[in-house]
Amino acid sequence: MRAVLDPNVPISALLSTGGAPARVVGEWFSGRFELIVSPRLLAEVERALGYPKLRARISEQDAHDVVQLLRRSATTARDPEDPLAQRSADPGDDYLLALAASERAALVSGDKHLLALEHELPVFSPSSFLVLLERGP
């Protein structure tokens, strides 16, 4: 199985090591799915980790380490050029939908705009994705 993690998933994993996002990241570490990233996604993770409200809770070293881990260990795909016909209520999230579609991957997100599309596209909350992984192929 292949998956794209919305930047909010690894960031949430850093903030709460016992929550579903952290368990999703742990499943990736265990090799349960192939993680797909792109330059734009990595840039968004890095930018968000620099926000003052997150910097107060996540050390600069931890932020750097997670970005480097994603760069080194995830499968890097090109940023899609073609938008999808299906769009999120938040246009800033459309690149995630396009990336997941172009890579034939599930999209895992805690974002309500993306989760609103779960009946039309393979978009899962971290908890739902964990259930999917437990069911197996």
Image (cartoon, helix red, strand yellow):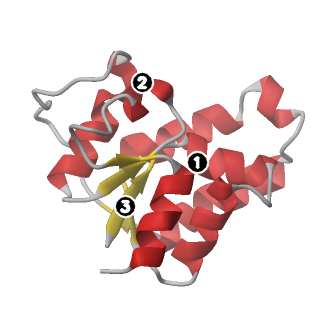
Pair 2/3: label in front: 2
Task: Look at label 1 and name its amino acid.
Answer: Val
86 or 118, which is in the foreground?
A: 118
**What's the amino acid at mark 2?**
His
Q: Secondary structure at mark 2?
A: helix
Q: Kindly identify the residue that appears in the image at 38 percent across and 22 percent down.
A: 92
**Residue name at image x 41 percent, y 76 percent:** 135
Q: Earlier in the sequence, mark 1 or mark 3?
A: 3
Residue identifier under label 1: 9
Crowdedness near tag 3: few (<14), some (14–19) or many (≥20) residues, C-alpha within 10 Å: many
Quarter of the rendering occupied by the N terminus: bottom left
Name the disc covering residue 35, or none: none
Whole-Å distance between the Cαs marked 2 and 3? 18 Å
Foreground mark, 2 or 1, reads 2
* Relative to 100, 51 lies left or right: right
Q: Is residue 13 above or below residue 27?
A: above
Mark number, residue 3: 3
Q: Is residue 14 left or right of residue 89?
A: right
Is tag 2's residue or tag 3's residue first in the polypeptide sequence?
3
Residue at mark 2: 113
The numbered mark, 2 or 1, whose residue comes first in the sequence reads 1
Quadrant in the picture for the C terminus: bottom left
